[in-house]
């Protein structure tokens, strides 16, 4: 059972490499839909972080780490939606009124 941290480290390194390779090859026109999908995944992360913060198994450590995870995931979701809204605003037609 001592190899589990090694396997987790290998999975982490491979996922970082794979994520970098995938994102670097995405055309600019697809960034907004992908960001919306990432925001949905971060929303799921908030639910998991709330469960971790509310767990009573380990007491203080779980509550602190869960609270930090809730805060960081919430910042990620709000920031992602703001950036997505701003990017979509660039594609809206401008009003040609008499302003």
Image (cartoon, grey):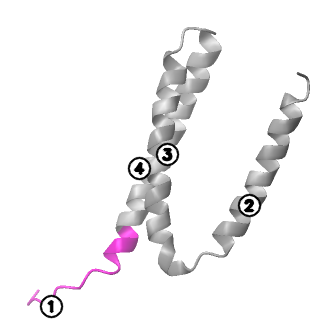
- Mark with earlier residue (2, 4): 2
> For the residues carrying marks 2 and 1, which lies nearer the camera in this image?
2
- Mark with earlier residue (4, 3): 3
Residue 57 lies left or right of residue 95; in this view the side is: right
Residue 82 position in % (x across, y down): 39, 59
- Residue placed most toward the observer, 4 or 61: 4
Residue 34 lies left or right of residue 81; in this view the side is: right
Whole-number angstrom distance, CA of label 4 to CA of label 1: 31 Å
Q: Is residue 89 magenta?
A: yes
Which residue in the protein does label 4 denote?
78
Disc number at residue 96?
Answer: 1
Which part of the image, by quadrant, shows the C terminus? bottom left
Which secondary structure lies at badge 2? helix
37 lies above or below 64: below
- Mark with earlier residue (2, 1): 2
Secondary structure character of the magenta stretch overall: loop
- Mark with earlier residue (3, 1): 3
The answer to whether the residue labelled 4 contacts the one labelled 1, judged by CB atoms less than 8 Å apart, is no
Which residue in the protein does label 3 denote?
42
Which part of the image, by quadrant, shows the N terminus? top right
Q: Which residues are magenta?
A: 86-99
Q: For label 4, count other residues whose C-alpha is less than 10 Å away and answer few (under 14), some (14-19) or many (20+).
A: some
> For the residues carrying marks 4 and 1, which lies nearer the camera in this image?
4
Which secondary structure lies at badge 1? loop
């Amino acid at each position: 059972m001592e190899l589990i941290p090694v396997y987790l480290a290998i999975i982490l390194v491979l996922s970082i490499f794979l994520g970098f390779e995938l994102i670097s090859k995405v055309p600019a026109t697809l960034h907004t839909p992908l960001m919306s999908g990432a925001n949905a995944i971060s929303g799921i992360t908030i639910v998991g972080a709330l469960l971790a913060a509310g767990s009573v198994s380990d007491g203080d450590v779980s509550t602190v780490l869960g609270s930090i995870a809730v805060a960081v995931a919430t910042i990620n979701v709000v920031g992602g939606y703001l950036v997505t809204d701003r990017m979509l605003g660039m594609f809206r037609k401008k009003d040609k009124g008499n302003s």
